[in-house]
Amino acid sequence: MNRVVDISSIKLSCRSCSLSELCLPRGLSDSELDDLERMMKQGRPIRRGEPLFRVGDPFHSLFAVRSGSIKVHLPTVNGEEQIVGFHLPGELLGLDAMGHEVHTCTAIALETSSVCELPYRQMQELCHQFSGLNEQFLSLISKEISGEHEMLLMLGKKNAEVRLATFLLNLSARFKARGFSEREFNLSMSRHDIANYLGLAVETVSRLFTRFHDEGVLQVQRRLVMIKDIQQLRAIAQVSDKNCPAAAR
């Protein structure tokens, strides 16, 4: 499937992109940005349910989500899927394949989405050429990994209501970082997807949404979530304002 077109046919500028502070290394010189923009590719929109890559696909590029949202899942021994992350605009995909050059997970669009493609070999050449870019790129990867570790810690030690509260606060912080409302947002993922990710039953997730709604913590209208009492949600998640999970996926 041909997902990308030549950069010369699209006016794509990292400098003018509203997500540049989120998905691009900071402190790049003009020449570094010029080279990065020449390397960058932007593909056609990915429709809901369409894969960006699948398990076993050869690794060629990293991807930065430009719009929409994408879920990542792993196959299980019984043939089902285990969701390991939801990626929003400004976040990187494809790090799973950097070691063995084969994707170990599948990335599926949750809604119509678009990505910027960073061909990995060309990215390596630029990193060798510009030491500052290499340091910033490694820092960006470290941030992604740290976020995943935070969420794994939460999933391993918390009860059901703490897991859901932490998940909602995580989304709230990530939407806020993108200039959107931290208290009102649409969930692109289904209740089933949330339950799969949090290691809970779908019925448990639905019951908790209803309880949070009845207690005045949330107002829920289908997939629209409005946080009415963010301090109470933080109390349920057992986190302070300073430690609110903002980076986990």
Image (spheres, helix red, strand yellow):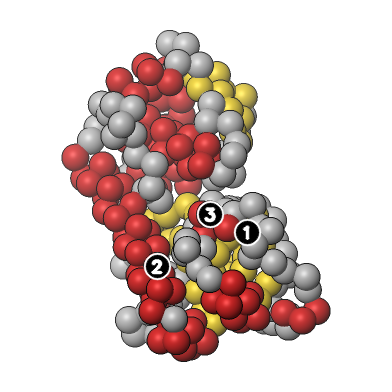
Specify the amino acid type for callout 2. Answer: Gln
Specify the amino acid type for callout 3. Answer: Glu
Specify the amino acid type for callout 1. Answer: Arg
Q: What element carries label 1?
A: strand
Q: Name the residue under label 3.
A: 21
Residue 205 position in % (x across, y down): 42, 32
Residue 136, disc: 2
Q: Is residue 195 left or right of residue 225?
A: left
As measured in the structure, the alpha-carbon distance from the residue carrying label 1 to the one carrying label 2 is 20 Å
**29 above or below 88?**
below
| Disc nearest the viewer among 3 and 1 | 3
Residue lying at 50% horizontally and 74% vertically, measured from the top left = 62
Residue 113 position in % (x across, y down): 66, 58
Tag 3 near tag 1, CB within 8 Å? no
As measured in the structure, the alpha-carbon distance from the residue carrying label 3 to the one carrying label 1 is 12 Å
Q: Name the residue under label 1.
A: 66
